[in-house]
Image (spheres, rainbow, N blue to C red):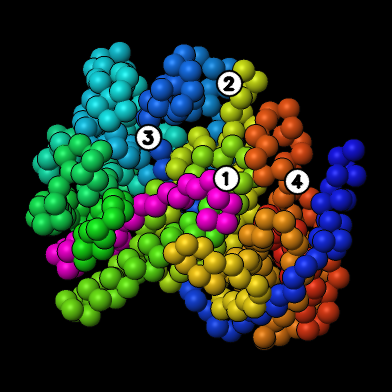
Amino acid sequence: MKKILLSLAFALPVMLNAQKATIRFDVDRTVSKIDPKIYGVFMEPIHFNGARMGLPDTVEFNTLYGTLYDPSSPLADNNGFRKDYIDAMKELKVTNMRWPGGNFLMGYSWQDGIGPKEQRPARINLAWGGVDNNHVGTDEWFALNKAIGSENVVCVNLGLGNILDACYWLEYCNYPKGTYYSDLRAKNGHPEPYGVKIWDLGNEVDGAPWELGHKTADDYVKIGREAAKALKSVDSSIDLVASGSSYYESTGQWVDWNRKVLLGMGDMIHYLSIHRYWEKSDDYYSYMGESAMDFEEKINVAASEIVTAKAIKGYTNPIYLSVDEWGIMSRNLLSVLPIAQCFNSFIRHADVVKMANFTMLTSLLNNDREKGTFKSPLFYIFKAYSNNCLGNSVDTWVQCNTFDGEKYKGIPYLDVTTVYSPDDKIVYINVVNRNKNEAIAADIIPTTGELSGVAEATLIAGADLNEPFTFDNQVKYVPVTKSVNTRKDGVSYSFPAHSFTQIKLKLNK
C-alpha cells in the first residue's frame, strides 16, 4: 500500500496540471556563500501547562527537564541528555545552539547553575512559571553542544541582570586561568576554557508586554554599549549580537528600534538579532502567502537599516542579521511547509542572514508522550536544507501564476531558491508549491552551463494538510527520491499541490 500511495504522489501532478511555470538559475550570479550557521537551533526551559496550550489542565511539561534532559530515561547519556535528541541533531548537522533563552534568560542568574547539582538553588521560572532546579547550567549546556558537535551561542541577561555579572560569566567560560571565575570553572572539572565566540546582549529587550526588564531603545543602547565595552575587556575576540526587533505592534516602532540600535551601537556588534514567528491564519492563502511575504519583509527592512546605518555612521565593521528565533509548531503538513519557506528566505538573503536558530531543538522531533519521539516531515525538510544547501545561493528567476492577499499582491505560487556547490558542480533547487489544489509544471533551465546525468527529485507532500503527525504513521513521512530525465538545456518537472520538492542536478560548465 505504501508503494502505491507514493507512486500516486508522484503521478498526481501529471494528472492535475493546470499551470505552467519557468525557473531559470544562473550559477555565475552568486548572492553569497551560505553560512552554515543558519542551521542552528534555540533552546530554553519553557514550562507549559494545559491552560497555556489550550489543552486540559492536566497536560504539563517542560521543553528541557523531562524532555531533552532526563537522567532517569534509559535513553539518557552520561550527562543526562536524551540520546534520541542528540542523534537527531547530529543527523541534521545542527551547527550551533543558542541558550539559555529566550524569555527565561531575562530573569536568570547563571551562577545558580554551576557547581555540584545537589547544592544548586531551586528558583521560580520567572518567565514561564514552575520551578527550575538549575540542574542544567553552563557546564551541562556545553556538554550537550559537545555531544551534538555544535557551536555555543550564549545570551547574557540584560533584563533583570547586570553588566558585571555578564562579565563574570564570560570570564568563567573563556578566560584561561588565574582569576576567580576561570579557576572556579577548573574547580568544577573544566580546566580548559570553552572559547565561546558569539554572545547575545540580552533577549527581545524591546518586548514590553512580556519581557522582564524590557527597555526603551535609548536605554538599551546605553546599557548595550557599556556591556559591549566591558565584555570586550574580558575577551576582545568575541562577536556580539545586539537585540533587534521582536515586538511587531501596529505603530511600526520595531523599525525605529532597529534604527536606533544600529545607529547607537552598530560599531560594536557583529550581528543584529531579529525574531519572527510565522503568522497564523485560518485562511490557507493568507497563511501560506501573506505570512511568507511578512517574513521576507522583516528581513528586507532590517537589512536595509543595516545599509542605512553604515552609510550614516561610516561603520567599517561587518554587520549581519541573526534570525535567532523563528519557526512554528509542527503538527501537520500545513504547519511544516512554512519551514521550507523560511529557509528559502534565509538562502535568498544569504548576503546578510548569517545565523538563524530554529525554535526549538526539541521541536525538531515529534514526541508521542506514551510511545516516544519520531521523525515527521519537519525533520526531513530541515535535513534537506541543512545537509544539502551548503554552497552558494545563486540568482533564481521564476515565472509563474500569482495570487493576491489582503496586504500583499502578486504572490508567486512557487517559492524557489537555488544552491550551487562549485566543488562538485551540484545544484539543489528548493521548491514550495503554495497552490492548495493544483500541481504546477515547470521547465527548469540553467542560464550558464549544461545539465548532465539524471536528476533526483525528493518530495515531501501529503493528501491531507491538516492530518496530525502520529508515531504510528512515521514510516509514511520518510521522503522518497525519484529519478527524472534531464536535457542539456534543462529539466521538466511537475510540482504537486501544497508540497515541498528538492531537485538535485549535475551541471557541467
- Closer to us: mark 2 or mark 3? 2
Is the Cβ of the residue at disc 1 closer than 8 Å to that at disc 3? no
The secondary element bearing badge 4 is classed as loop
Q: Is residue 78 above or below residue 320?
A: above
Give yes or no for contact between labels 4 and 3 (Cβ–Cβ under 8 Å). no
In the image, 293: left or right of 18? left
Q: Residue at image x 29%, y 76%?
A: 307
Task: Quadrant for the N terminus, please.
Answer: top right
Question: Is residue 285 magenta-colored?
Answer: yes
Callout 3 crowding tier (Cα within 10 Å): few <14, some 14–19, many ≥20: many
Residue 101 found in image quarter: top left
User: Disc 4 designates what residue?
Assistant: 463
Report helix, strand or loop for mark 2: loop
The residue under label 2 is 369
Residue 219 position in % (x across, y down): 10, 52
First reached walking from the N terminus: tag 1 or tag 3:
3
> Residue at label 1?
335
Mark 4 or mark 1: name the one nearer the start of the chain. 1
Depicted 350 relative to depicted 381: above or below? below
Q: Which residues are magenta?
A: 260-286
Q: Nearer the viewer, mark 2 or mark 1?
A: 1
